[in-house]
Amino acid sequence: MDSLIAAMEGLVEDIYGHVHRVSGVSISIGEILGLSKADLDRLATVGVLHDVGKLHVDTKLLSKPCELDAPETQHMQRHTLFGFAMTADLFEREVSEAILFHHERYDGSGYPHGRAGEEIPLLARIVAVADAYDAITSERAYQPALPAAFALEEIRTFSGIQFDPLIVEAFMDSVSDGTFESTQRLILDLAAS
């Protein structure tokens, strides 16, 4: 896993921070949901490797400062398929499938296969919320970092559409009870060491 993380570091600015923050948010949600230690470990791995397929995406697209056109979007969306192919023989099925399905949407309008609701693996549904939160609150080539309050409202707004309502509720609970903040600090400390 370390070699995959190291390879990802050169892709885009702050990919290392992004994947570790996603991992931390994912773990805080998993703790609220009462996931087992084994599932929390899987979730940590998925969080860190969810974008590993971007190693096979044109790097110009990863840092493009404006909206992607349709062919570029299709190419970018293939990162989930690439990530699955890269991890299927290295990790448990739950890990590689969560990497494959982390951009599916609760209403079935996501990619790569248009799965909906509980057809989407639980770990993928958790990472989807964590990834969205970090994407909104982090500086991106195409968007400045937006406030946490805005991100929380966006996630609430898309509950039942993009996100599993159960996962959104657990995320909001983790923010309210401090689990989110303490897990984030721990993950970032571990990433820095």
Image (cartoon, helix red, strand yellow):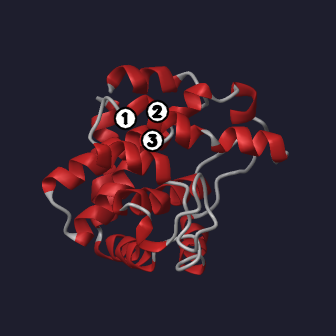
Which residue type carries mark 1? Ala
* Chain-order first, disc 1 or disc 3: 3
Q: Residues within 10 Å of mark 2 (few under 14, many from 20)?
A: some
Q: Residue at x 52, y 60 (%)?
A: 133
Q: Are marks 1 and 2 in contact (CB under 8 Å)?
A: yes
Q: Residue at x 33, y 70 (%)?
A: 174
Residue that badge 2 annotates: 85
Which residue type carries mark 3? Val
Q: State whether residue 151 is above or below residue 92.
A: below
In whole angstroms, how far apart are the C-alphas of marks 1 and 2? Answer: 6 Å
Q: State whether residue 171 is above or below residue 92.
A: below
* Chain-order first, disc 2 or disc 3: 3
Q: State whether residue 119 is above or below residue 74.
A: below
Q: Position of residue 26 (x, y in %)?
A: 36, 57
Q: Secondary structure at mark 2?
A: helix
Q: Residue furthest left?
A: 37
State the image quarter where residue 141 is shown: top right
Q: Are marks 2 and 3 in contact (CB under 8 Å)?
A: no
In whole angstroms, how far apart are the C-alphas of marks 1 and 3? Answer: 19 Å
Which residue type carries mark 2? Ala
- Disc number for residue 88: 1
Q: Is residue 107 visible?
A: yes
Q: Position of residue 47 (x, y in %)?
A: 39, 46
Pick the quarter of the image with the C terminus.
top left
Q: Is residue 40 left or right of residue 184?
A: left
- Disc number for residue 19: 3
Choose mark 1 or mark 3, whichever is in front.
1
Q: Secondary structure at mark 3?
A: helix
In whole angstroms, how far apart are the C-alphas of marks 2 and 3? Answer: 19 Å
Pick the quarter of the image with the N terminus.
top left
Q: Position of residue 28 (x, y in %)?
A: 30, 61
State the image quarter where residue 60 is shown: top right
